[in-house]
Image: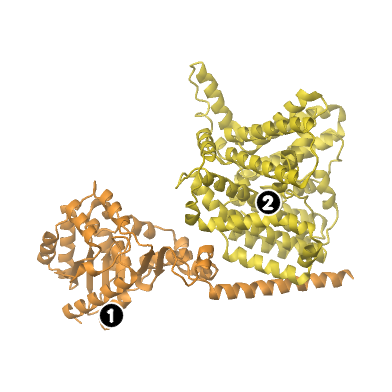
Amino acid sequence: MAFNSFPFLIFILLFFIVWPFVKRKQNLRFVLLISSSFVFYGWWDWRFIFLIIISGLVDFFAAWAIEKYRAWGKFWLTLSILINLGMLSIFKYSPFFAGIIDQVFGLFSIATEFKHNLPEFTYLLPVGISFYTFQSMSYTIDVYRSKLKPTNNILHFFSYLVMFPQLVAGPIVRAKDFLYQLKTSREVSGLEFWNGIKLIILGYFQKMVLADNLGVFVDNAFAGVDNGIGIYWWTVMACFTFQIYFDFSGYTQIARGLAKLMGYHFRMNFNHPYLALSLKDFWSRWHISLSTWFRDYVYIPLGGNKKGLFRTHLNIWITMILSGLWHGAQLNFVLWGAYHGMVLSLERMLHTRFKLKETVLKRVFDSGVTIILVTIGWVLFRATSVNQIVQILENLFRFDFNFEFMTIFFNSMVFLVFAILFEGLYPVLRKRKSVRQFLKNKYIESIVIAFAIAAIIFLRGPEKEFIYFQF
Amino acid sequence: MRTKENKNYTVRFLITLAMASLLIFIIGKNRPEPISSQILKEKFWSDKVHSTEKFEIIFSGDSRLYRGIDPKTVSDRVDGLSVLNFGFSSGGHNKIIFDEVNNKLDFLSKTKVVVLVITPHSLTPNAQENSHFLQEMQRNESDIFNRRYINPFFNFFEPIKPMELLQFKQEQSGYFERFNKNGWVASWKFPTNQQVGIQKYAKDFENNKVKTSILKELYNQIRVWEDDGIQVFAFRIPSSIEMEKLENDLSNFDEKELIKGIENAGGEWIRIDKRFEYNSYDGSHLVKSDAIKLSEKLGDILKKRFKNL
């Protein structure tokens, strides 16, 4: 069930009615957490619960075996990774790779039908499979690297793996950050409760008011309805830039807020990414739990920047392409990853050649260039085919300033302005102490939240599924 | 200390909730009326199809009917007889609808009247599919229940578009619809465009023309109704000069032949005087004010011609 659905409201209400009675009981609270999470996940398709259970059991026992039989550690780790990536490949990538194999054979005039002959279940994508597979794998890898002691309590492990707030769209929680939290009964202070509520309201506001309303214009444009050129596509892409951010960030804020109400803490997953001054900076602010995962488990093991210039650039490219592929088994995601790899490489080369003095003007320039590069990247991410990518990029760079579409999509334009103010106001607020203090005033804070709740009710857009559920 | 702090935050949370509730109540009470309410639209169609209420006068036809006749106005002109507007998008005159009209007609009443609202399109094969009616008819039970009884409760919370807020109490652009009891959708559009309907129908009539077999089925049903003591009226609903010309030229529709057929079957034709004086917003459907004007006129005509009042 999705956070923005009526069944979820009933579910969460029931959960928090029962939670206070079990939260101090060692194993009972984990039983409630795990069973609720399975109800939450099974609401989409109960059959895929077995996939999570298999993935979890494999890693729980692999980690246990690694710790017990260190000499065989590599074997258990490889086995765990093969099973996890195998399941991910079958359910997420098999149609994509079968299609590529068919095309390769086609080049030699050999007709194959691997894609056509795939079993039907390989076309069903279990919600959030990439999130929980990566989370599960990181546990085993950390145990293998002796960075983490494996837990002997299977209820602990499954509570960490399937905890419903983060199960389907992250953040990808690391076992070393979370398992210790499960050991003790968590008391929720008044401040934590209040912060949890604020995060939940903020998340719903980002998703339902900003992302869903911006999505109306974006969906129309990508469906080919009333398409324009030039400024039209820049506006569409600006809307998508904010839509995907608020959609995903909204989910994460709700997840963090819910965890806080239970007494648990998830790390921040977004840190105002559109205020980044370079693409490298962007990746340290965007989907932080995934980018650090790739840094720790792919980029650094490949050698990172320690094996010479060529290998550094190659490692960046490999990491970014894999990160693109993580999002989905489609060529556009691979291209998106490659594009980011290319720009990160170029950026690295430029930064080593030219070291300019930090000035306000340079910061504005860097920030502008970064957001434009990121926005162009989103074309590759959002498009559904290579043809569409080419078409949109062509239209994006055609000189046209016809603003007529703004009257037709006036409502979305209002939310675009809201979105820009929402993210753009942040640096101003952050720097001015008086503004910060004013907003921290308990009465002002309550009024702002009350208005946010009213906005969620009356300014919500047409209900849409969270974009990152498909990954 | 900790307990005091917790209490403070609980109070803050409750105050915030109270403020939010008050705000929601104030906004909900003073909000601009939506251009077209999705919740009320769904309730309207489910009620029209699934209500078990019986009526003494039933108008049957397509979208020109459900936007063009107000049952309440007609009822007021015919001494309060119960009136139903049983029009559907692209509705046709055939057994699917005739059976449903029979279900909704009050056979215990002295006055039993069916008014067939004729448009050339309603006599074409495409219209005989009655897909809009069937779509509503075939909804599952829980969906119908939600649409009729649960969702309207949330109408208060229906979203507001920024455009509606900015142009509050001014003339806004949009396709306005108000869903009334007993089947009338009071409609108007700003800005109006007479060509919208013309272009749509010109394209539709290319491969979809009035068929004799459909007319025969209609005449047979009129005979059956007349034999059962049901008075049957028919009339061609006003649209626009351009639309009538297009329909007469492209659809194979012959009004004189139709009148003859209906009258031979025992039905009565209603001639609407000055029928081009009614205003349409898209060349096809009447604007709200003219729908009321037409309903008044029809009510007066029907009252004069009822056999059993």
Q: In this view, does A429 lie to the left or right of A213?
A: right
Query: Relative to residue A291, is residue A462 depicted above or below?
Result: below
Res B177 seen here: yes
Mark 1, other Cα within 10 Å: few <14 / some 14–19 / many ≥20: some
Mark 2, other Cα within 10 Å: few <14 / some 14–19 / many ≥20: many
Task: Find residue B276 and report its image quarter.
Answer: bottom left
Q: Give the spatial CA distance, label 1 vs label 2.
A: 59 Å
The type of residue carrying mark 1 is Leu
Colour yellow maps to chain: A
Task: Find residue A151 and report its image quarter.
Answer: top right
- State how the image is colored: by chain
Query: Relative to residue A42, is residue B224 depicted above or below?
Result: below
Res A90 seen here: no
Give the image location of residue A284, x and y in percent.
Answer: 76, 42
Give the image location of residue A295, x and y in percent.
Answer: 77, 36
Colour orange maps to chain: B
The C terminus of chain B lies in quadrant? bottom left
Task: Find residue B220 and report its image quarter.
Answer: bottom left
Residue A249's tag is 2
Q: Do labels 1 and 2 share a chain?
A: no
What chain letter is assigned to the residue under label 2?
A
Identity of the residue drawn at 86% across and 35% down: A67
Depth check: A408 or B215 in front?
A408
The type of residue carrying mark 2 is Ser
Residue B81's tag is 1
Which secondary structure lies at badge 2?
A: helix
Q: Looking at the image, which residue sits at the far bottom? A: B79
Depth check: A443 or A79 in front?
A443
Which secondary structure lies at badge 1?
A: loop
